[in-house]
Amino acid sequence: MKIGLTYDLQEYYLARGMSEEDAAEFDRPDTITGIESAIKKLGMETDPIGNIFELTERLVKGDRWDMVFNIAEGVKGFGREAQIPALLDAYGIPYTFSDPLVLSLTLHKGMTKHVIRDKGVPTPDFMVINTLSDLEKCTMAFPLFAKPVAEGTGKGIDSASKIKDKKGLREACEWILVAFKQPAILESYLPGREFTVGITGTGEKAVSTGVMEVELYGNADPDSYSYANKKLYESRVRYKLVNDPEAQKAAETALDAWRGLGCRDGGRVDLRSDGKGTPNFLEVNPLAGLNPEISDLPILCGLSGISYDELIKRIMNSALERIFPQETLQK
């Protein structure tokens, strides 16, 4: 079986003038090497393709694959993560992870939370700020938390994201609107524990790979898993595998969200508990980072005793079972 690999490399965009923070979600070469190595160990042939521009050139040339392992984040628009899956759908080429509908929905945190709330999954009260005039309609009580509506890797989150008054609210939203050229999402700030739940599988076969609590050291940006805290995680953050009743509830809530949104194969759900210790959905990452050393999902799996190769095997098996249900899966 021939497996193509689609991805966005940081170095590709940095060489074209993109800033380090703008390119933060894109991958390092060792991510691609790690995935490729794990797939080869399953007895499959790999073919590194690259980003959507490189994929388009290959498709026009007539190249095809039995399946594509897709981790491309895309560059522009709320549908950026959906661009390669949509293109592959058009050519009838199957791929790992979620489809264009799910990837477009889940990139927009506000739209995601509308669906999550409709599904009955607990999530903090929220409001999307498209323009500063929207703040006049905000009736949520302080403290609030503000972040860009469609970013990952903690981008746009820092010590000023927790908001205590109207002045800070306006300043935070204005900065997000200008700096990120996209709406801000406001949430009621939750004071409890912060969790990330790893998930592999699809639908009723989805399972948690473990629950990791994110604890901040004293030198970290307070109250948030910020861009700087993620970047400097070795000195600012403690990752701890947890399985107490609150953590177990976090896993249940994460799986409810994963299934309700229609996510596939593997990823992460981030949660934070309210003042009563109830884990609330914050966001889902259906294209979770897969760097063997620095990405949250592999770190979490490592704490759970799941090797990187085993993680990639579980993702591949979920995809193969969806796409080729009659074929024997890797054991």
Image: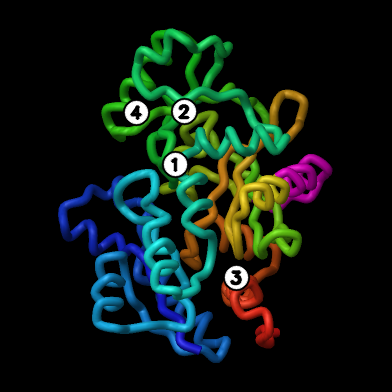
Residue carrying label 3: 315
- What residue occupies the far right of the structure in this picture? 245
The residues tagged by marks 2 and 3 sit, at their Cα atoms, a distance apart of 31 Å
Q: Tell me the element at label 4.
A: helix
Look at the picture and state if 146 lies above or below 236. above
Look at the picture and state if 195 lies above or below 64. above
The residues tagged by marks 2 and 4 sit, at their Cα atoms, a distance apart of 9 Å
Residue 250 vs residue 77: left or right? right
The residues tagged by marks 3 and 1 sit, at their Cα atoms, a distance apart of 24 Å
**In the picture, residue 178 is in which quadrant?**
top left
Identify the residue at image location x=70%, y=33%: 122
Residue carrying label 4: 176
The residues tagged by marks 4 and 1 sit, at their Cα atoms, a distance apart of 13 Å
- Of the image marks 4 and 1, the number of the one nearer the N terminus: 1
Residue carrying label 1: 154
Q: Position of residue 214 (x, y in %)?
A: 61, 44
Residue carrying label 2: 185
- Of the image marks 2 and 4, the number of the one nearer the N terminus: 4
**In the picture, residue 73 is in which quadrant?**
bottom left
267 is within the stretch colored magenta: no
Q: Amino acid at mark 2?
A: Ile
| Of the two numbered discs 4 and 1 in the rendering, the one whose residue sits closer to the viewer | 4
Q: Nearer the viewer, residue 329 or 275?
A: 329
The disc label shown at residue 62, or none: none
Identify the residue at image location x=67%, y=45%: 257
- Of the image marks 3 and 1, the number of the one nearer the N terminus: 1
Q: Amino acid at mark 3?
A: Ile
Magenta residue span: 240-253
Q: Tell me the element at label 2.
A: strand
